[in-house]
Image (cartoon, rainbow, N blue to C red):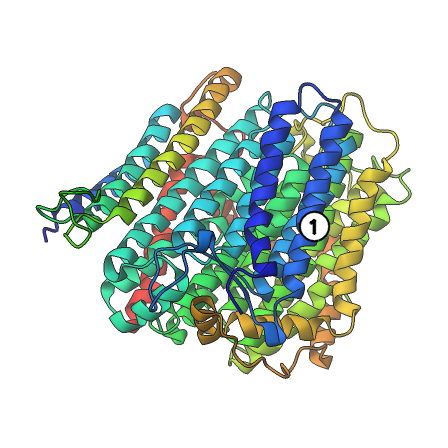
């Protein structure tokens, strides 16, 4: 088993965090959050991956006893994507409203909540 | 007894009913009069509360827990791919609290909002379903999903006032930081699945034990805790809380402070006790959470006392109390757990009532700025006394439930060898209650020096807050008064109803009975119940400490009111705290990038506190 996909997953998670920390635009921050979440997709899929094993669909060619990739993590990833779509859409909607009300989407210039 | 008999079927019903009703309300909201949607939603919450009470009545003692493997995917031969819901006394009791607070918040909302819009009540119902699901889930991935369901509903409810700039910013900060925490949790869940091939808590318990302690197990533990601790608002992951509470409508704050934040602590405790208790040793967890809880309690109380925005003040008081709950959980015995639970219940009553009272202030005077409102409420007759009553409840004065919980938790800390911790409990409850009493006496009795700082208004003073009614409220409607009185009365009753603390003690004992949980979830065989849990009552020391924190809170309140007239020596020594205080206040910048940086710092800190001692 290669460690490379785990490295990519950790990298995506951290680079997403870094993107939010350094963000000068709320849309960029929300997309960075989605990048961080992409790290979780990569992690989950690589956990279930098996080299040379087909998709977990059993039929006349694939006997239930044969090796397949793990379907559980694929289900988790799908659920994760649904969650991501909801949260991203909601946060982008908030960002649009902030642009309308504050006239800016730069976090450095939003100061309604200090202290 | 088969898994899916009778009561067990109620667990999925409790989660599905609010979702179905939410979908219905979205569809019909624009065609029916508002009173119908109000009544339907409130009745749903009340019905869920009743169902949860039935579940609670069928747990504990001989019956143990209520277990459902959804759609009949039962475990065979000690393994399973099914999803499990487990109701024990603790989760069922929490479910009752969630639904009760939701019903009261909705009742309060009848007259609180002039225009409620078509989305508020459905969002509240989704929020209810998410929290109930989180409480009952026995599957760690389901916990993540319900965590995000309640999160998404909560973000939308925070940013509900789309015309208010600070409300939007609060909602966005809340959403980004909580979702990021949840993704860290999901990473931890992925690591755990890679190690063991399981997601169900009872199966994880066995397989993590077999794996033994390793760096990956510690990593998974720290990552999974990240999301729960963000929700629980542990310092330094707490920044979102004040932003969200300050801007969310008051009935929503009731649920945030009353139970959502505490569900974070519940998640930490549940996952630790079932999954990691056999691997990650007690002493590391105790050390880590005593340190982090103490820091949380101190930062929360200091920030609380500095606020003039009423809702931010109450929000930081919640941060301070969460610190105490974490410390009590960290005792890792039935005494500490029971103390934390009683304290959470009493705190839910007191804090929720205070948030509702802050909502009354907002609708009546059009502001929640303590200094601007100086003396404005002198003609009110009932409300001042409710404020003072709530302040006393928060100060853990006997015989309130908060006081009894604090007493039991203090006894547990002394038993565990932390003789200094009761002092922390007393100080935190005195400072936070002192801030509340100070605000009440300034607004309603006109005490204290007249405001001099008004010429330099802060950005978060609360004077810009927009009321939810057009014009101002003359009289407080009875539907707004009843929830406040019920909550305060409940907080008092918890401390005086005989036998309640004993029942909480048994629930706590069941909660930390790991083998019982695993056995019953997998085979539905109950284990022997505990006959008696010791030390679940008032102690002389506890009463004395409770009374002294009440007296101290009055002292803090008057010191805050008449800060200019304190002796010079006192003012000078208080002035020494000025510089560190400014640093702490400046850290609360409202900047999402800063919050994420602090999240990473907090995770590193937790990792060091847990990882280094076990090496």
Which residue was labeled with disc 1?
Answer: B100
What is the quadrant of residue B256 in the picture? top right
Image vertical order of residue B407 relative to residue B150, above or below? below
Q: Quadrant of the image for the C terminus of chain B? A: bottom left
> Residue B59: horizontal and vertical position, in percent?
61, 67
Residue shown at 38%/63% (left/top)? B75
Please tell me which residue lies in front, B571 or A83.
A83
Q: Secondary structure at mark 1?
A: helix
Residue shown at 66%/53% (left/top)? B51
> Residue B122: horizontal and vertical position, in percent?
61, 32
Please tell me which residue lies in front, B78 or A40.
B78
Q: Is residue A8 left or right of residue B140?
A: left
Q: Report if residue B589 is visible in the image.
A: no
Pinpoint the chain carrying mark 1: B
Please tell me which residue lies in front, B184 or A48.
A48
Q: Residues within 10 Å of mark 1 (few under 14, many from 20)?
A: many
Q: Report if residue B334 is visible in the image.
A: yes
Q: Is residue A62 left or right of residue B9?
A: left
Residue shown at 64%/29% (left/top)? B25
Image vertical order of residue A102 relative to residue B450, above or below? above
Q: Quadrant of the image for the N terminus of chain B? A: bottom right
């Amino acid at each position: 088993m290669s460690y490379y996909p785990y490295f990519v997953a950790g990298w995506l998670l951290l680079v997403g965090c870094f993107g939010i920390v350094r963000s000068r635009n709320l849309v960029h921050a929300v997309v960075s959050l989605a990048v961080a979440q992409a790290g979780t997709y990569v992690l989950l899929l690589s956990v279930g991956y098996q080299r040379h094993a087909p998709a977990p669909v059993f039929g006349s060619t694939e006997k239930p006893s044969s090796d397949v990739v793990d379907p559980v993590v694929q289900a988790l990833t799908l659920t994760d994507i649904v969650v991501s779509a909801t949260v991203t859409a909601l946060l982008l909607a908030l960002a649009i409203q902030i642009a309308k009300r504050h006239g800016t989407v730069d976090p450095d210039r939003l100061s309604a909540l200090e202290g | 007894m088969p898994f899916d008999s009778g009561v067990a079927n109620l667990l999925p019903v409790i989660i599905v009913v609010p979702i179905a009703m939410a979908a219905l309300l979205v569809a019909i909201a624009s065609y029916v009069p508002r009173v119908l949607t109000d009544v339907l939603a409130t009745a749903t919450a009340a019905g869920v509360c009743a169902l949860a009470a039935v579940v609670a009545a069928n747990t504990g003692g001989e019956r143990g827990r209520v277990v459902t493997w959804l759609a009949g995917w039962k475990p065979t031969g000690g393994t399973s791919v099914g999803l499990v819901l487990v109701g024990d006394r603790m989760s069922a009791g929490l479910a009752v609290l969630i639904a009760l607070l939701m019903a009261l918040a909705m009742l309060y909302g009848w007259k609180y909002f002039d225009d409620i819009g078509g989305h508020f009540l459905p969002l509240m119902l989704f929020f209810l379903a998410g929290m109930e699901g989180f409480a009952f889930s026995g599957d760690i991935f389901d916990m993540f999903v319900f965590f995000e369901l309640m999160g998404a509903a909560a973000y939308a409810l925070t940013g509900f006032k789309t015309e208010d700039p600070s409300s939007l910013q609060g909602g966005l900060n809340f959403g980004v930081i909580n979702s990021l925490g949840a993704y860290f949790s999901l990473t931890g869940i992925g690591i755990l699945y890679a190690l063991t091939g399981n997601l169900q808590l009872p199966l994880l318990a066995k397989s993590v034990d077999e794996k033994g302690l390793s760096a990956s197990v510690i990593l998974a533990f720290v990552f999974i805790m990240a999301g729960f601790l963000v929700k629980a608002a542990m310092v330094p992951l707490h920044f979102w809380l004040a932003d969200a509470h300050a801007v969310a409508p008051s009935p929503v704050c009731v649920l945030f402070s009353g139970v959502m934040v505490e569900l974070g602590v519940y998640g930490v405790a549940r996952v630790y006790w079932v999954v990691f208790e056999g691997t990650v040793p007690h002493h590391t967890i105790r050390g880590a959470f005593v340190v982090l809880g103490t820091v949380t309690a101190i930062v929360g109380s200091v920030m609380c006392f500095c606020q003039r925005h009423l809702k931010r003040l109450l929000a930081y008081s919640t941060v301070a109390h969460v610190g105490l709950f974490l410390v009590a959980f960290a005792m890792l015995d039935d005494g500490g757990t029971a103390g934390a639970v009683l304290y959470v219940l009493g705190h839910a009553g007191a804090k929720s009532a205070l948030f509702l009272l802050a909502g009354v202030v907002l609708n009546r005077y059009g502001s929640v700025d303590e200094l601007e409102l100086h003396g404005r409420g002198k003609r009110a007759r009932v409300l001042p006394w409710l404020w003072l009553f709530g302040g006393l409840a928060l100060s853990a004065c006997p015989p309130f439930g908060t006081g009894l919980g604090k007493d039991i938790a203090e006894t547990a800390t002394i038993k565990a060898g932390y003789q200094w911790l009761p002092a922390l409990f007393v100080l935190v409850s005195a400072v936070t209650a002192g801030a509340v009493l100070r605000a009440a006496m300034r607004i309603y009795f006109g005490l204290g020096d007249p405001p001099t700082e008004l010429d330099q208004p802060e950005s978060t003073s609360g004077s810009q807050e927009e009321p939810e009614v057009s014009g101002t409220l003359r009289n407080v409607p009875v539907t707004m008064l009843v929830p406040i009185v019920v909550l305060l009365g409940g907080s008092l009753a918890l401390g005086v109803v005989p036998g309640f603390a004993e029942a909480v003690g048994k629930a706590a004992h069941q909660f930390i009975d790991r083998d019982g949980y695993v056995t019953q979830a997998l085979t539905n065989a109950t284990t022997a119940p505990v006959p008696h849990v010791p030390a679940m009552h008032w102690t002389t020391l506890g009463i004395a400490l409770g009374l002294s924190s009440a007296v101290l809170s009055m002292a803090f309140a008057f010191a805050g009111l008449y800060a200019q007239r304190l002796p010079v020596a006192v003012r000078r020594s208080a002035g020494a705290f000025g510089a560190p205080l400014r640093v702490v206040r400046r850290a609360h910048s409202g900047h999402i990038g800063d919050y994420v940086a602090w999240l990473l710092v907090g995770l590193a800190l937790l990792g060091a506190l847990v990882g280094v001692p076990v090496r």
